[in-house]
Amino acid sequence: MRIGVLTGGGDCPGLNAVLRAIVRTAENEYGDEVIGFRDAWDGVRNRDTMTLDIESLRGSLPKGGTVLGTRRGSPYDWPEGPSLVSEILGEYAIDALIVIGGNGSLAVANELHRDHGLPIVGVPKTIDNDVEGTDVTFGFHTAVQTATDAIDRLHTTAESHDRVILVEVMGRHTGWIATYAGIAGGAAAILVPERPFDPVEICDLIRRRNSRGRYASIIVVAEGAEPRPGTMEIGPRETDRFGHVRFTGISELLAPEIEHRTGIEVRVVKIGHIQRGGTPTAFDRVLATRYGLAATAAVHDGAFGHMVALRDNEIVRVPLSVPGSRTRTLDTALFDAVALPFFS
Ligand code: F6P
């Protein structure tokens, strides 16, 4: 078989590990050839390909990012996009396409399969861990570790200066990274989109801590966290050229509110793309490898229109319609049971 592969959306640690596993299984077990499309769907449109084989991916397992490059955007943004994709896959004699992506890329993959019959298998990725249908996406674990390491360091400087530090982490619509890193890093509070916050309550919490001699507080803020309606003005959010809301800056708005209300010095640290880069954790390498093996097997079983997923530690196949059906928001039971009781 000739298998095409692309990586779409924001990068995340573990993408190369998936590519490596696909290529190793494809070559060693099935005698397949694997063609990579560079820069996601742009590589299909521009006929920009690279041969992926065991040799070219040697040493890639611990490397962050993606050797294929990635972009946002979709064939549905181009005139006649889906038929052009179909035509170009035909030109390259591609028997199956593996799309490694988050919610956006997997939704596009679903439509291309459903409406145009393209033979696609999906692999879920994102540091945000917000893909419906899988218990976890690779990249999340690494991002949490990176954010936790940063929080560990911030504790000592916050304590030395008796400051409040707001640590902003990624998570457009979900508080997965904030919650896990906040719990692991012993944050005084965690603000997530799923539980809108009240700045007055945060200030009360800081004052209570102060009255007990806890003059430093680390507050982890998911970039998509929002105040309860009527509690704080945040103004309109910017959008990028794909119309996605650009989430970043909520902590910069919250910091002066806290300073003003409590008189305590506040600093803001945005971990930003550091949490998306660098070497994947062992957990993410293993998960990515399992996904890569399973995706190649799914292609050979003709399980098109499915993505591979992790459920109860088993790799399963889930219809590609599932990830686009909703955003997998935070397990609020975990948040309420484990994170909330510590905020006092
Ligand atoms: O990969 C998902 C994500 O990490 C979001 O949490 C974040 O809002 C977004 O990517 C930022 O991505 P970029 O700066 O590449 O547009």
Image (cartoon, rainbow, N blue to C red):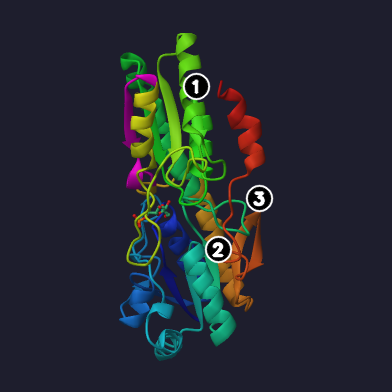
- Of callouts 3 and 2, the N-terminal one: 2
Disc ID at residue 204 = 1
Tell which quarter ligand 1 is in: bottom left
- Of callouts 3 and 1, the N-terminal one: 1
Q: Amino acid at mark 2?
A: Leu
For mark 2, give the secondary structure. Answer: helix
The relative height of residue 315 versus residue 213 in the rendered view (above or below) is below
Please rate how many residues cluster around mark 2, counting C-alpha atoms within 10 Å: few if below 14, some from 14 to 19, many from 20.
many
Query: Closer to the camera: disc 3 or disc 2?
Result: 3
The relative height of residue 256 versus residue 160 in the rendered view (above or below) is below
Q: Nearer the viewer, residue 218 or 238?
A: 238
Q: Residue at x 39, y 57 (%)?
A: 11
Please rate how many residues cluster around mark 3, counting C-alpha atoms within 10 Å: few if below 14, some from 14 to 19, many from 20.
few
Expressed as whole percent of the image width and height from the top left, the position of residue 190 reads 50, 33
Q: Mark 3 vs ligand 1: CB under 8 Å?
A: no
For mark 1, give the secondary structure. Answer: helix
The CA distance from mark 1 to mark 2 is 51 Å
Q: Residue at x 43, y 85 (%)?
A: 89
- Of callouts 1 and 2, the N-terminal one: 1
Q: Residue at x 63, y 66 (%)?
A: 322
Asked if the magenta segment contains residue 195, the reply would be: no
Please rate how many residues cluster around mark 1, counting C-alpha atoms within 10 Å: few if below 14, some from 14 to 19, many from 20.
some
Disc ID at residue 223 = none
Looking at the rendering, the stretch of residues picked out in magenta corresponds to 262-275
Q: Which residue is mark 3?
A: 313
Determine whether, in the image, residue 41 is placed left or right of residue 175. Answer: left
Q: Which residue is mark 2?
A: 293
Q: Amino acid at mark 1?
A: Asp
For mark 3, give the secondary structure. Answer: loop
Asked if the magenta segment contains residue 272, the reply would be: yes
Expressed as whole percent of the image width and height from the top left, the position of residue 12 reads 41, 54
